[in-house]
Amino acid sequence: QVHLVESGGGLMQPGNSLRLSCAASGRTFTNYAMGWFRQAPGRERELVAAISTSGGSTSYADSVKARFTISRDNAENTVYLQMNSLEPEDTAVYYCASVLSWLSEFVPTREIQYTYWGQGTQVTVSS
């Protein structure tokens, strides 16, 4: 069993930056590909960014490319989502997810591929 705990959400003004963290426990972190998803009110959950076990491969939603960066610290069992130039459209509950992967550069991009999920952290972007 993998336990994921997100943190770092909050209320931000447009244009500001925010970093989300997801701390993992329970299994060997380096064996798990990680992803950040988000769900806005009335909308389906969508992929924001994902990262391979090695950290060498990533994938982003078109809407966040060049603004968001996913990274992982395997020594700290933590995955991060650095969000810059925040927009009101980024308002959502952000979820961290993980899946066991034996392929070092595999980047799962679909929700159904993920096994474990955190409880989510709210990000609100408003002036």
Image: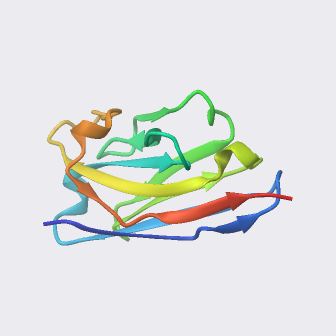
Q: From this viewpoint, which residue is outermost toward the front?
A: 42
Query: As drawn, is 93 to the left or to the right of 77?
Result: right
Residue 19, percent across and down? 61, 62
Q: Quadrant of residue 9?
A: bottom right
Question: Vertically, is 94 above or below 54?
Answer: below
Please name whichever residue, 53 or 1, is drawn nearer the observer in this view of the structure: 1
Give x and y (percent) for residue 112: 24, 38
Picture quarter containing residue 55? top left
Residue occupying image coordinates x 63% and y 31%: 63
Residue closest to the far top? 62
> Nearest the camera: 111 or 57?
111
> Which quadrant of the figure contains the C terminus?
bottom right
- Residue at x-position 34% and y-position 61%: 74
**Quadrant location of the N terminus?**
bottom left
The image quadrant that residue 4 belongs to is bottom left
Q: Closest to the observer: 97 or 107? A: 97
**Residue 25 placement (x, y as % from top left):** 25, 72
Q: State the image coordinates of residue 6 (x, y, percent, origin top left).
A: 44, 68
- Residue at image location 32% in from the left, 45% down from the top: 54
- Taking the image as shown, residue 4 lies to the left or right of residue 73, namely left
Q: Is residue 41 above or below residue 122?
A: above
